[in-house]
């Protein structure tokens, strides 16, 4: 893995294209993205000696990349299409938007796509396979994204915010789009980003912070050209641009003096402004709105609700095929800590569930995956199961605000996978992935998961972890989170370890093996083992040394890095652990607590309510228990706190040793190795700080010593 100046190629180093670039390829079809496919292959060929043709059939070919609408499909491609159609019966199953067929017959690898985006995704599939794509005959496989909408939200500010900086919760330097109030102008970087996103399946980006400050608000009107310039660069990679807008836009941008969604002038204003947006950016995706949340303006100011608010924007977008992503992250951030009846976990459901059925078709209610705020461990948000008549998107946080801030290794795919696989109605009901995909009402059968038509649901949204850092993500290993986000939006049932393998093969293997095929032996196999040892369990390791048993937070207020057990306990933000000398945890039961458990359908409403049945990892999220309470694991709460904190810090030390052992082996670029090692030093320091603060805190509160007599400061 080498670092070309100035930007690391992440999972698209030139070597990843060796297998494609050394072959004879035919590209058939028309359209902007077909040009992209051709250019990608042509570049690879220039490097590796292959050749690529457009439209001329002077074979033989090793690889045919074709739109099924192409005028004439050569032998193998035509046969694959006929076979597929025959297979699908006379009605003809369609390949579907962004989908493709992949097959190898008679020595030719064939990718057939119904549209040009599908062809691009098919090419990247071949790139992922490397030599394996050309090794043996391959039955036709049908691939299409589970989710139609696979989006990254950038919390990037155009102006530098005095507290939050250029990127809110950004841990990878400045924005790749904006610097000091202006576009960066470095569109090559944006183009490289678009390629990376297309290669993992992302097809939409929102380019500014959901907290919309004065300059950002103007992106909608007089600074729209800045957005159009970005859209032009993303378009060839099948990525649509979205914009975060202020609900108060009419007022702050010189329109009517009110933003009341039921006011005629306000409707007209949004309609006019939106028309101009589409004149400038014809494939514009739509608006993202954070309203009535953490100080952002919203419909409450006018006595209206969130359906009224979302619908006025949706109405303006509808004629242009645009959508509004309306965030459900609405809660009272000015509560009184003494008021035990207010529970932040309840807020999104309280506000949104009653509105189910009232949103226009092109509103996507965007729900954070947990009921509070991207903590290391939360239950799945009950909102996700409460709005069957509404298009829902599930929001994940790729940026590691609460999971180590890209200074700690924390591979998040296992967490996301648990979220996507969670079944709110129990084992026979739909999963979160089905709800986000919009296929929850399709009869559930494990066998058709992969072939099921992509739903027109709200999809998956991730808060981006990218900045202008040469490695894109600050911590080089955090690239894997971005890659995994895209892949899970495409295949939610994919195994996180298998996704990690793909990422390792693309990112690291080429330099070591001279090809993208997984090396079975030697140094690169060692690298693979090391990365799995470090990353597979890193989320659970992080959980072990931070806030225990689902209680959440315990971070430094403001920047949210490092331990501060009581940091938020007496603040207006509404997250408490309620630790005293006898016990800890938040009583969210219906019987004696805030009643939050009642927001879930059965069986989970019962499971979470019951002290005996509640899963250990969420115990303190749902219950306040004495320190001596015996967990399902057999350990007491207090002993669990000690054991996990000692273990978690030790696991970080072990991961650091694994990484250190790679020094001088040549499988990893030395600068990259040094950077990760430096970050491991910080992770270890911080994990030990967490261990000692949490253990000391609970020892002092409870007076219960560690059964193993280890040192607690
Ligand atoms: O997690 C919190 C962050 C805020 C963020 C907010 C949100 C953009 O601390 O920085 O604001 O969530 O999701 O809107």
Image (cartoon, helix red, strand yellow):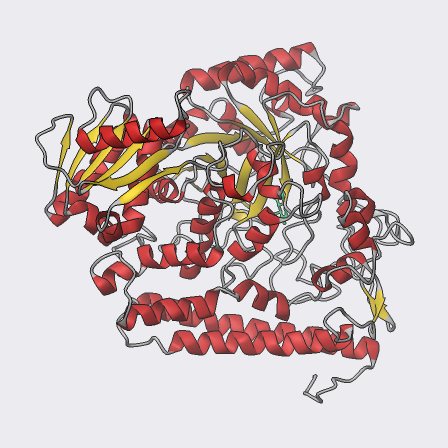
Q: Looking at the picture, does residue 64 appear above or below residue 270?
A: below
Q: Quadrant of the N terminus?
A: bottom left
On screen, residue 279 above or below 124 = above
x%, y% of residue 101? 33, 35
Q: Nearer the viewer, residue 642 or 183?
A: 642
x then y, percent, for residue 71: 21, 19
Q: Residue at x 72, y 74 (%)?
A: 640
Q: Quadrant of the C terminus?
A: bottom right
Residue 626, horizontal then vertical, whole percent: 85, 70
Q: Position of residue 493 (x, y in %)?
A: 51, 48
| Extreme residue in the bottom direction | 709
In the image, 483 versus 165, the foreground residue is: 483
How many callouts does the rendering have?
Answer: 0
Q: Is residue 177 left or right of residue 374?
A: left
- Residue 159 can be seen in this image: no
User: Residue 459, can we see it?
Assistant: yes
| Residue 183 in the image: above or below residue 513 | above
- Residue in the picture at 12% in, 44% down: 50
Q: Viewed as shown, does residue 63 lie left or right of 118?
A: left
- Which residue occupies 69% across, 41% down? 294
- Please state if 234 lies on the left or on the right of 580 as rendered: left
Q: Where 374 falls versus 513 (above or below)?
A: above
Q: Image quadrant of residue 115?
A: top left
Asked which quadrant contains residue 549, the reply is bottom right
Task: Looking at the picture, tell me which residue is in the foreground, 665 or 97.
Answer: 97
């Amino acid at each position: 893995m080498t670092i070309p100046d100035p930007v690391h190629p992440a999972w698209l180093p030139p070597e990843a294209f060796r297998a494609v670039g050394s072959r004879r390829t035919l590209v058939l079809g028309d359209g902007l993205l077909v040009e992209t496919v051709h250019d990608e292959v042509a570049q690879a060929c220039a490097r590796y000696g292959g050749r690529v043709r457009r439209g001329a059939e002077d074979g033989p070919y090793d690889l045919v990349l074709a739109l099924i609408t192409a005028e004439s499909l050569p032998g193998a491609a035509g046969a694959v299409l006929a076979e597929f159609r025959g297979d699908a019966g006379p009605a003809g199953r369609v390949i579907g938007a962004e989908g493709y067929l992949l097959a190898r017959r008679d020595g030719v690898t064939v990718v057939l796509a119904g549209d040009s985006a599908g062809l691009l995704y098919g090419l990247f599939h071949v790139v992922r396979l490397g030599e394996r794509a050309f090794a043996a005959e391959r039955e036709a496989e049908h691939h299409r994204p589970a989710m139609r909408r696979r989006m990254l939200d950038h919390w990037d500010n155009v102006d530098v915010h005095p507290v939050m900086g250029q990127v809110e919760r950004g841990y990878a330097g400045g924005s790749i789009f904006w610097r000091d109030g202006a576009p960066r102008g470095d569109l090559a970087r944006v183009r490289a980003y678009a390629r990376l996103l297309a290669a993992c399946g992302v097809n939409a980006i929102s380019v500014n912070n959901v907290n919309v400050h004065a300059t950002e608000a103007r992106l909608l009107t007089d600074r729209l050209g800045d957005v159009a310039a970005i859209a032009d660069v993303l378009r060839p990679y099948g990525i649509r641009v979205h914009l975060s807008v202020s609900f108060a836009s009419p007022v702050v941008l010189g329109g009517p003096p009110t933003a009341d969604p039921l006011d005629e002038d306000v409707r007209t204003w949004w309609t006019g402004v939106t028309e101009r947006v589409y004149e400038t950016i014809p494939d514009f995706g739509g608006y993202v709105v954070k309203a009535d949340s953490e100080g952002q303006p919203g419909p409450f100011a006018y006595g209206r609700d969130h359906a009224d608010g979302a619908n006025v924007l949706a109405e303006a977008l509808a004629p242009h095929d645009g959508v509004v992503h309306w965030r459900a992250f609405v809660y009272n951030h000015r509560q009184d800590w003494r008021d035990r009846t207010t529970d932040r976990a309840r807020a999104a459901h309280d506000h949104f569930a009653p509105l189910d059925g009232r949103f226009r078709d092109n509103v996507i209610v965007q729900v954070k995956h947990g009921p509070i705020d991207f903590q290391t461990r939360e239950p799945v948000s009950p909102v996700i199961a409460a709005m069957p008549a509404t298009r829902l998107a599930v929001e994940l946080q790729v940026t590691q605000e609460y999971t180590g801030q890209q200074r700690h290794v924390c591979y998040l795919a296992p967490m996301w996978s648990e979220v996507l696989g969670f079944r709110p109605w129990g084992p026979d009901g739909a999963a979160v992935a089905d709800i986000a995909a919009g296929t929850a009402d399709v009869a559930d059968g494990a066998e058709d998961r992969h072939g099921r038509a992509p739903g027109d649901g709200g999809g998956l949204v991730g808060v981006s972890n990218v900045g202008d850092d040469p490695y894109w993500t600050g911590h080089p290993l955090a690239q894997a989170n971005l890659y995994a986000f895209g892949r899970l939006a495409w295949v939610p049932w994919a195994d996180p370890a298998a996704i990690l393998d793909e990422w390792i093969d693309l990112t690291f293997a080429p330099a070591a093996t001279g090809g993208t095929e997984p090396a079975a032996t030697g140094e690169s196999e060692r690298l693979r083992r090391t990365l799995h040892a470090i990353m597979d369990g890193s989320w659970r390791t992080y959980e072990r040394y931070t806030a225990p048993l689902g209680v959440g937070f315990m971070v430094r207020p403001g920047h949210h890095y490092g331990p501060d057990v009581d940091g938020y306990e007496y603040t207006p933000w509404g997250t408490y652990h309620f630790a005293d000398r006898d016990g800890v945890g938040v009583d969210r039961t219906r019987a004696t607590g805030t009643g939050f458990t009642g927001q879930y359908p059965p069986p989970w409403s019962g499971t979470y309510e019951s002290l005996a049945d509640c899963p250990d990892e969420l115990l303190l999220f749902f219950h306040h228990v004495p320190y001596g309470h015996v967990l399902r694991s057999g350990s007491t709460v207090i002993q669990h706190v000690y054991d996990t904190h000692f273990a978690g810090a030790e696991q970080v030390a072990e991961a650091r040793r694994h990484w250190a052992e790679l020094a001088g082996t040549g499988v990893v670029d030395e600068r990259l190795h040094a950077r990760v090692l430096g970050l491991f030093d910080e992770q270890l320091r911080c994990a030990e700080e967490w261990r000692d603060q949490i253990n000391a805190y609970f020892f002092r509160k409870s007076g219960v010593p560690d059964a193993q007599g280890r040192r607690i400061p």
